[in-house]
Image (spheres, rainbow, N blue to C red):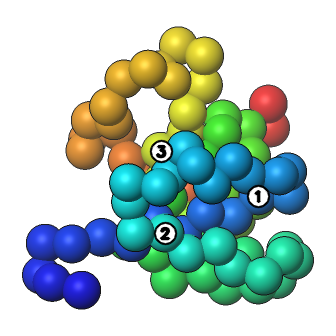
């Protein structure tokens, strides 16, 4: 991969429609929380659903900035200022 390229690492305990990501270089790790957590902790950024403690744990342990997607912002591109490392696990 080149200097300005990216790889989407897609982790989910739900089924994923891979056709949605066919235009992107993607990687789907084998199922299992420990494996998913390990991959997410090595990413440059994490995008996840709001209230996901799994995403917050990966961000905190890997010191990886994350962006929480919710109903209010699901159709917007994240602002880089809004992507931050979790410092505490928030209850939702």
Q: Residue furthest left?
A: 3
The disc label shown at residue 26, or none: 2
Q: Could you tell which of marks 1 and 3 lies nearer the N-terminus?
A: 1
Q: Residues within 10 Å of mark 3 (few under 14, many from 20)?
A: many
Q: Residue 29 at x, y = what percent?
A: 69, 79
At x 66%, y 39%, the residue is 49
In this rendering, the answer to whether 82 lies above or below 85 is above
The structure residue drawn at horizontal position 51% and vertical position 24%, both measured from the top left corner, is: 74
Residue 72 seen: yes
Q: For mark 2, does the 10 Å Cα neighbourhood hold few (<14), some (14 to 19), or many (20 or more) residues?
A: some
Give SS at disc 2. Answer: strand
The tag earlier along the polypeptide, 2 or 1, is 1
Q: Residue at x 73, y 38 (%)?
A: 51
For the residues bearing labels 3 and 2, Cβ distance under 8 angstroms: no
The residue indicated by pointer 3 is: 67
Q: Earlier in the sequence, mark 3 or mark 2?
A: 2
Residue 78, percent across and down? 33, 35
Where, by quadrant of the figure, is residue 24 drawn?
Answer: bottom left
């Amino acid at each position: 991969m080149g200097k300005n390229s990216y790889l989407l690492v897609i982790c989910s305990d739900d089924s994923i429609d891979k056709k949605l990501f066919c235009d992107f270089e993607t990687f789907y790790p084998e199922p299992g929380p420990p494996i998913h957590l390990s991959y997410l902790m090595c990413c440059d950024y994490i995008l996840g659903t709001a209230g996901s403690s799994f995403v917050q744990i990966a961000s905190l342990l890997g010191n990886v900035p994350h962006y929480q997607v919710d109903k209010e912002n699901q159709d917007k591109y994240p602002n880089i200022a809004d992507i931050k490392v979790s410092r505490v696990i928030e209850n939702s």
